[in-house]
Structures are given as structure tokens and as C-alpha cells.
Amino acid sequence: MKKNSIRILVEGAAMVSLATILSYIRIFKFPTGGSVTLLSMLPIVVFSMKYGVKKGIFVSFVFALVQLLQGISEGLFGWGLTAPMLVSCILLDYIVAFTAIGLSGMFRNKGAAGRMAGTVTALILRFVCHFLSGVVIWGTVGELWTGFSINNVFLYSLIYNGIYMLPEIIFTVIGAHALFTVPQTNKLLTE
């Protein structure tokens, strides 16, 4: 293996580890589910911006698998989903949603505006996955919806996923912008 390939692998593993640690630091956890973390997506965003979408997708896929394991440890299999719904949940809420973060490097060569546009686009794609899961999967599980005054599945999923994803997107974009604006960290991130 080339020295550069080893460096990329080590950095990718470090970013997945850091993102996983940050995902356990929850600034706010909503009683209905979902939480705002301490910039848990930022390490994956930074990696994708530094090395591009192809490598970013690979690292974000590994992060998605780690998030799936975290979901399993928090009771994913005890949610009462049928087998097809469980597979759909795993794909939409974990694999596709968290892998989408790796797309954040898509406009990395377009300056600060491109980096921010790539980050926002990737994180909105993650939100769309969770939104679709809420509509298609969770909207059909009637007992999970009791106690809420919103009867519209689309509106409920938008609000449910928006209350934690919007702050996550804003904080991650600010964090990425700060890292790439400060000359010392920008040099480290673009080497």
C-alpha cells in the first residue's frame, strides 16, 4: 500500500471514530425521538471535503454501519416492525441517510460557498431519507402516532425530523465553515 493510501485509511477511521463519539454527546434529546448532537456529522463532512465524494461515501457508509449498530443497541429490533418495514427502516434511516453525508464534498473545489452548498445538500438528503421513512414506514404504525395532535403523516414527519435535523444542519454548516475559514485548520484540512 502506498503511504498516502494508509494516511487516508487512518484519517477515515479517525473521522468515523470521532463522529461516533460525538454522536453520543447529545445536546438535546427530544421525548418523541431524535436528538441534536455535538457536531457528530462534521468529521465525515470534513473528510469528504478533503478527499472528495468517492472516499467520503466510503467513510460515511462505514459511519452508517456504526450508527446502525448504535440503533440496534438502542432497541431497533424491539420497535415492532414487520420484516419488510425493518429492512426499509435500516436502509432509509441508517444506511442511505448516513451515507448521504459523504456527498458533502461534491462542490469542494468551488470555494467556501461550494463547501457550504455541498454540506447543506448532503445533510438535506439525509433529512429527506428520514422524512420518507417517517411517511412510508412510521406513518403506517398507528400506535406510534397516538398522543400527537397532528394527523397528517407528511406534516408529522416534517416536524418530527425537522426539529432535530434543522439544528444539526445549521450547527454542522457553521462548524465546517469555521474550520475551513481559520487559516491554521484550513491548512491541515487541505493538505
Image: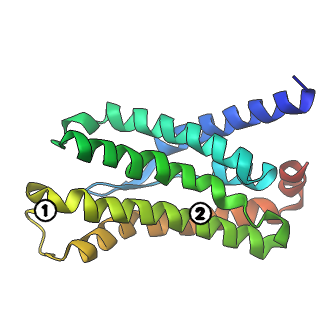
Q: Give whichever of discs 1 and 2 has the lower sequence position.
A: 2
Quadrant in the picture for the N terminus: top right
Residue at the spot 18% in from the left edge and 42% down from the top edge: 82
Above or below 152: residue 64: above
Above or below 62: residue 102: below
For the residue carrying disc 2, how many other residues have a C-alpha within 10 Å: few (<14), some (14-19), or many (20+)? many
Amino acid, disc 2 = Ala
Q: Which mark is residue 122?
A: 2
Q: Nearer the viewer, residue 179 or 111?
A: 111
Horizontal side, residue 94 vs residue 148: left or right: right
Could you tell me which secondary element the residue under label 1 belongs to? helix
Horizontal side, residue 133 vs residue 39: left or right: left
Instruction: List the residue tagged with mark 1.
Output: 145
Q: Residue 53: x, y in percent?
A: 72, 53
Q: Residue 27: x, y in percent?
A: 44, 54
Above or below 67: residue 171: below
Residue at the spot 27% in from the left edge and 65% down from the top edge: 135
Horizontal side, residue 24 vs residue 159: left or right: right
Question: Which residue is the extreme one toward the front?
Answer: 84
Query: Residue 34 sits in which quadrant?
Result: bottom left
